[in-house]
Amino acid sequence: MPAWVGAYVRFINRTNAAVGRLAMFSLFALMGVMLWGALARAVMTPQIWTDEMGQFLMMGYFLLGGAYALQEDSAVRMDLLYGSWSDRTRAIVDCVTILILFVYLGVLLWGGIESTAYAFEYAERRRGLWRPYMAPIKVVMVTGIVLMILQCTSIFLRDLARALRREL
């Protein structure tokens, strides 16, 4: 494999590891928001923003951490046949199946970009009492999808090298 392929794979892996580890800390923010909401309900008047902010933080956690989960191979896999295959056969099957994931993520990205453009153009707000602007969370959504696509290309190149019996 060319040297730039290995450099690309290492760069994407480092980037997604950093973003994924940063996303892990958003759980502390989520716990703080949920704790504040529970205390406010018990002691003071209920806060209208805590539930939606918790949803936004959780979505950001999942989407920004998704590429890191792919990188760490922590996805659930049906190991009926996969475990008995050779490394090369697994790499070939992974190269084929990740193409399906590319199609899925491509459709998500297309819809995400259109939705984000709409949110910016019309200053879209969420329905309800708090009515937060939707553009920031949609930007996080598109960023997470792009990071997953980049991680999938990294995984595809790694598996392609393994299928061709070449080192990165």
Image: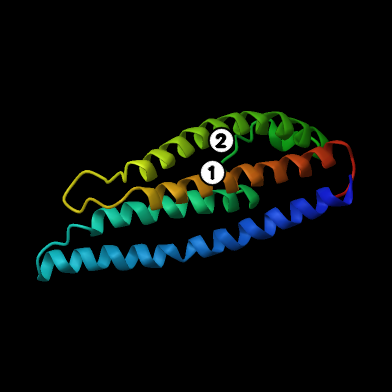
Q: Which residue is mark 1?
A: 145
Q: The N terminus is located in which quarter? A: top right
Disc 1 residue type (three-letter): Ile
Given residues 12 and 38, the one toward you in this image is 12
Taking the spot 18% from the left edge, 46% from the top edge, the residue there is 128
Q: Secondary structure at mark 2?
A: helix
Give coordinates of residue 73: x percent, y percent: 63, 48
Q: Is residue 158 left or right of residue 140?
A: right
Give coordinates of residue 124: x percent, y percent: 30, 44
Disc 2 residue type (three-letter): Leu
Give coordinates of residue 100: x percent, y percent: 62, 28
Given residues 162 and 153, the one toward you in this image is 153
Give coordinates of residue 52: x percent, y percent: 27, 53
Gap between marks 2 and 1, in whole Å?
7 Å
Crowding around mark 2 (Cα neighbors within 10 Å: few <14, some 14 to 19, many 20+) is some
Q: Which residue is mark 2?
A: 105
* Callout 2–callout 1 Cβ contact below 8 Å: yes
